[in-house]
Image (spheres, coloured by chain):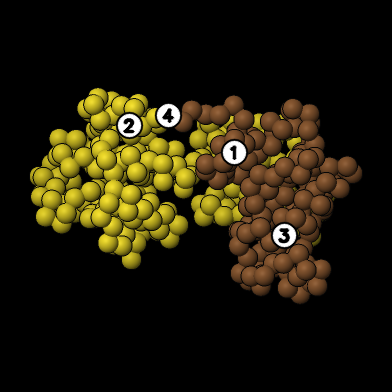
Chain colours: A yellow, B brown
Amino acid sequence: MKLSVVEQLRAAREAKAPVVLVTRIDDGSQRLLDVDRQPDDPLADSALEAVRTDRSLGISENGAEYFLQPFNPPVRLFVVGAVHIAQALVPMAQLAGYEVTVIDPRRAFASEDRFPGVNLVCQWPGEALAALEPDRRSAVVTLSHDPKIDDPALKTALATEAFYVGSLGSRRTHSGRLERLAAEGLTKAQLAHIHAPIGLDIGGRSPGEIAVSIVAEMTQTLRRGKAE
Amino acid sequence: MTEATDPSARDRYAPLDSGELLDAAAQWKREGRSVALATVISTWGSSPRPAGSMLAVDGDSRILGSVSGGCVEGAVVQEALEIMKDGRPRVLEFGVSDEDAWSVGLACGGTVRVYVERLEDG
C-alpha cells in the first residue's frame, strides 16, 4: 500500500464519504472506489454491498481475485443530557468506535471537568442536533429526563435517518412523552422508532450498567437492524 | 483526553479501527521505519477476527491491531519482516488442515487467509 492511499482514506473519512479499498491480490495493485461518485465502475455493485453491510468481501472478476474493504465514516453518537449516566456512556461508546458529542444547554452539566476532551455543545438540543446533521450512521440518545431538553431532541432525531434513537425513562415517563410528541404532530410510525425504556433488558441499575445496556442495544441495532 | 500526537498511543485505551491504524502506520513510515500491513482477506469456520481486520508491524516487530485473537500474529510478524525486505506482497493461510499452521495455534478450528504487503512511499 502506498502512503498516498492512506492519505486518500483519511481525506474520505474527514469528508464523511464512504469509500472502498480495492486490492488485486495476485499483483498487489490497489485503488480507492468512491461508491457515490463512481456508480459505473465494474466493481460498483460489490463495493456498494461492502459499504452497506460494513463488511469486507472477496470477489473474482475475469479470473483475478479482488479484496474489497469498506471504509465507512465513523459511527457518531449524540448524547442529549450531560447527566451522570452520560459520564459512563461516553467512554464506553468511544471504546465501541463512536465519535461522541454531548449536548446540554446547562453549562453546569456540559462542562469540560465532567467530560474531558469530549465534544460539548452547550445549546438547546433541537437546533444543535439539527445542525450536526445525524445520518444513517448516527445514534441519538436522550438522557436528561427533562421534556424541555429531551422532546425537541427527539423531534429532530426522528426526522433524520439516525439508525438508533433511544430515550431514558420508565414506561410511564415514556407514555407521557409519546402523548406530548403525538400532540406535536409526530406520527405513530415515527414514535415507534424510539427505543424506550432505553437499552437491552439486563437488569442494570448503576449508571455504568445502564450505559452497558445502551451500548449493547445500539450495537444490536447497528449490526442486526431493528431489534426483534 | 486530547488527541495524542502519535495515533498509535491511542491504541492503549481504545482499539483503533482500520482507518486509524493506517494513520498510525503511515506515521511510523514517515519517521523512517519499515512498515508492513496484514489484512484478513477471508475466513472459514470460526475465526476470531472478520475479513478486513488489520495488523501493522514495524521493523522492530512493534505491532498495532490484530488479525486473530493472538494465535497467528507471531507467524504473521515473521513473514512481515521478510516482506519489508523484498517488497513482494503475499497471502498466508492458517488453518486446522495445515499442520504448520496448527502448530502456530489457530485453536479455534477456523481457517484464515491473511494478505501481507509493505507500506510504500509515494
**Residue that protrudes farthest toward the bottom in the picture:** B97
Are there few (<14), some (14-19), or many (20+) residues within 10 Å of tag 1?
some
User: Which badge, 1 or 3, comes first in the chain's sequence?
Assistant: 1
Q: Is residue A176 left or right of residue A168?
A: left
Q: CA distance from mark 3 to mark 4?
A: 36 Å
Q: Which mark is residue A117?
A: 4
| Residue B32 x, y percent position in the rendering | 78, 29
Spatial distance from mark 1 to mark 3, Cα to Cα?
22 Å
Type of amino acid at the residue the image marks with label 1:
Glu
Distance CA(mark 3)–CA(mark 2):
41 Å
Classify A223 as above or below A9.
Answer: below
Report, in whole angstroms, how far the alpha carbon at label 4 lies from the one at label 2.
10 Å
Residue B20, image x, y percentages = 59, 38
Name the residue carrying label 1: B20
| Marks 4, 1 in one chain | no
The chain that hosts pointer 2 is: A
Q: Are marks 4 and 1 in contact (CB under 8 Å)?
A: no
In the rendered image, is residue A196 in sight? yes
Q: Which residue is depicted at the point 38% across and 41% down?
A: A90
Residue at 78% x, 57% y: name it: B75
Judging depth in this view, the residue of B49 and A58 nearest the camera is B49
* SS category of the residue bearing label 1: helix
Same-subunit check for callouts 1 and 3: yes
Task: State which chain disc 1 sits on.
Answer: B
SS state under label 2: loop
Single out the mark in the foreground, 4 or 2: 2
Give the amino acid type for the residue marked by disc 2 in the picture.
Arg
* Whole-number angstrom distance, CA of label 4 to CA of label 1: 18 Å
| Amino acid marked by disc 3 | Val
Q: Which mark is residue A114?
A: 2
